[in-house]
Amino acid sequence: MVEASPRRAFDVSTGVDFERRDPYDWCMATQLTPEEAIERARRLQDDRLTAVRTVAEARQSLSDVRDETARELADLQARIAERIATAEREDVRAYSAALSAGWSADELRKIGFAEPDKKARTRRRSTRKPAASSAPAAADDSQSDPSTKG
């Protein structure tokens, strides 16, 4: 018959063997040296700092992507607006050419071509403004002349 080995009292969570006879051995299993404690704390802190660094880098990347896509969107919108403006100008030219060819606006409307949304702008010629009169200057001179004061 095989004899079972005697059972020993051992705490797995702390690693303490309760069968030890020397009290110093028992204390060493639960006590950390200051250097070990600092090293454990430093590792935990490093892990936490690494997590914060990862979040900061991700947020910066997100901000960079948002800035870049905003610039791209603005460029795209400007190109689209220019393409639309060019097409509108061409539409106005074609409509004006049809009017010049003898079609009336009513006839074009009956065919199915309404007037363009953006009509060609005509510049108004402004009349020349008369040169500034010297009357205000003369009024200023009369106020500053001591002989005119009463």
Image (cartoon, rainbow, N blue to C red):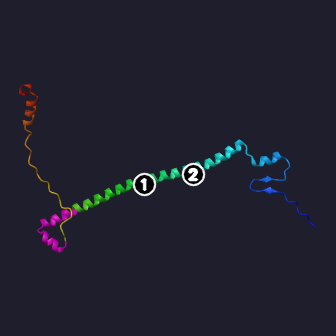
Badge nearest the viewer, 1 or 2 = 2
149 horizontally vs 92: left or right: left
* Residue at the limit of the structure toward the right, as seen here: 1
Give amino acid for label 1.
Answer: Arg
* Residue 10 sits in quarter: bottom right
- Residue at the spot of label 2: 51
Range covered by the magenta-colored residues: 90-112
* Residue at the limit of the structure toward the top, as seen here: 147
Residue 104 is one of the magenta-drawn residues = yes
- Residue 124, image x and y in percent? 12, 53
What number of labels is visible? Answer: 2
Q: Which labelled disc corresponds to residue 27?
A: none
Residue plotted at (84% across, 53% down): 19
- 137 or 95: nearer the eye? 137
Residue 106 is one of the magenta-drawn residues = yes
Calculate the distance from the C-alpha at mark 1 to the C-alpha at mark 2: 23 Å
* Residue 9 sits in quarter: bottom right
91 horizontally vs 134: left or right: right
- Residue at the spot of label 1: 66
